[in-house]
Image: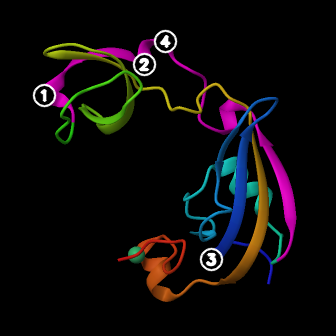
Amino acid sequence: MKIAKDCVVSFHYQLSEVGGEALESSEDGVPMAYLHGHGNLLKGLEEALIGLASGDKKSVTLPPEKAYGERRDNAMQKVPIKHLIGKYKRLMPNMLVKVNTEKGPVNARVIKPGKFMVELDTNHPFAGKTLEFAVEIKSVREATEEELAHGHAHGEGGHQH
Ligand code: ZN
């Protein structure tokens, strides 16, 4: 069957920055599984996969505006360490942390830790990058009713709960 709304797709991918380094790959683990048409993937990637079937390969290039957006200068913030979620023994530059904001928990990267305050970069690590996904479709199946009710894929490569 071909990829369309309400099917569960599992695929391997290699993600790299165009003209740059490899960023992520699923090749060493289980393929990633997602429920198509429910906003579980980057929109541009999801749209590019429509109509593909098991065994198909495709390379999809997404500019920042279709991926994780441009880097924002105002994403640099100094926040009280007590606003971080979870306990950190020692904060180090480049550590990835979660911080509570008015908009809910946000992932951030430590720029400069201080005694009570920490300087964070809340840009997505891939912000500002043009991304290339090399995708190989492993399987396409109809979603179960439970998956449709939850809005995500279950089983290997999907949500485990
Ligand atoms: Zn579920």
The magenta stretch spans residue 96: no
Which x, y percent locates residue 97?
32, 35
Q: Quadrant of residue 90?
A: top left
From the image, which quarter does the C terminus lie in? bottom left
Crowding near pointer 2: few (<14 within 10 Å), some, many (20+)? Answer: few
The magenta region covers 55-84
Name the kind of residue labelled 1 in the image: Lys
* Residue where numbered disc 1 is placed: 82
Q: Mark 4 or mark 1: name the one nearer the start of the chain.
A: 4
Q: Mark 3 or mark 1: name the one nearer the start of the chain.
A: 3
The secondary element bearing badge 3 is classed as strand
Q: Residue at x 19, y 15 (%)?
A: 117
* Residue where numbered disc 3 is placed: 8
> Along the line of sight, which residue is nearer the eye, 1 or 91?
91
Q: Quadrant of residue 141?
A: bottom right
The secondary element bearing badge 2 is classed as helix
Specify whether 81 is left or right of 75: left
Q: Label 4 vs label 3: CA separation?
A: 38 Å
> Along the line of sight, which residue is nearer the eye, 49 or 57?
57
Q: Residue at x 42, y 18 (%)?
A: 75
Name the kind of residue labelled 3 in the image: Val
Q: Quadrant of ligand 1?
A: bottom left
Q: From where the camera sits, is residue 4 visible?
A: yes
Q: Residue at x 21, y 39 (%)?
A: 85
The secondary element bearing badge 1 is classed as helix
Q: Mark 4 or mark 3: name the one nearer the start of the chain.
A: 3
* Residue where numbered disc 2 is placed: 75
Q: Residue 73: give its label.
A: 4
Name the kind of residue labelled 4 in the image: Asp
